[in-house]
Amino acid sequence: MKITRHRWRSLVAAVVLLLVSSSQAAEVRVFAAASLTDSLKEVAAGYAKKSSDRIVFNFGASSTLARQIEDGAPADIFFSADEAKMDRLAAKGLIDKSTRKSGLSNSLVIVVAADNGASVASARDLTNAAIRRVALGDPKAVPIGIYAREYLERLKLWADVAPKVVATENVRAALAAVEAGNADASIVYKTDAAISKKVKIAYEVPPDKSPNISYPVALVNDAPTPQAARRFLEYLDSGEAERIFSRYGFVLTDQARR
């Protein structure tokens, strides 16, 4: 079959268009827990030096993000602050189970205002009359609130603290409530307490008293850019990313160190 000059030019143009299209940067949409905000932004900045892909974040409460994915929001990666929200998506066939990893953990602390903050030396002090409002991520839905409630239930303090609880959208909102003087104390992740100059850690929950805190991450089954998302997932598992997470105070689990 003889190829005419016109047809040849058309074929060349098509190949060039294909090559240009394939070299264009992909946009990877990462739905991630609010407590990961600062660390993930730095991880993405490091990744940008190695890849032309653009990482776009949607930070919020894991419960809210999971619900958005259930409702069809275009997400490539889900990075949750607890296993329960990831389990929920897995049960509905919304994540690629083969990509699921849980390499990060955290710890709980009680914070008060840095200046003239309430006197708190233990979790039991949250039951004192001087503590009128305790900001927590919604204990019925938000991971940090669920962890805090579980911890206080173990100490048999939840019944006394519950009437004082000011439920917030996520851990950053709980932290902000103490910063603004709208709450006397809060139970947050240690990593979040570390980024604020307006609060101080009044008490650190001992590891043996804390619930098991776990951050699973996975590819969403209907990811708009799955190949690019897989590349970023691999980078999240790299030594460079792990060093950033460690610097922000996250605990690397055995899975992350494998």
Image: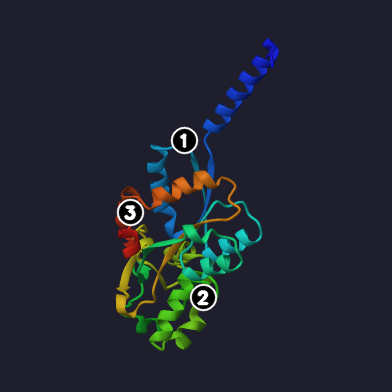
Q: Helix or strand or loop: what does disc 2 sit on?
A: loop
Q: Earlier in the sequence, mark 1 or mark 2?
A: 1
Inspect the image, locate mark 2, and give the three-letter code of the amino acid beneath it.
Answer: Pro
* Residue marked by disc 3: 242
| Mark 3 residue element | helix
* Distance from the alpha carbon under mark 1 to that under mark 2: 40 Å
Say which residue label 2 marks.
139
Amino acid type, label 1: Ser
> For mark 3, does the 10 Å Cα neighbourhood hold few (<14), some (14 to 19), or many (20 or more) residues?
many
Front residue (pair 246, 6): 6
User: Is 19 left, or right, of 112 in this rendering?
Assistant: right
Quadrant into which the C terminus falls? bottom left
Q: Which mark is residue 52?
A: 1
Instruction: Select label 2 or label 3 by which is in front.
Output: 3
- Dot 1 lies on which element? loop
Residue 121 horizontal side relative to residue 70, left or right: left
Residue shown at 43% from the left, 76% from the top? 148
**Residue 121 x, y percent position in the rendering:** 30, 78
Q: Amino acid at mark 3?
A: Glu
Q: How is the image coloured?
A: rainbow
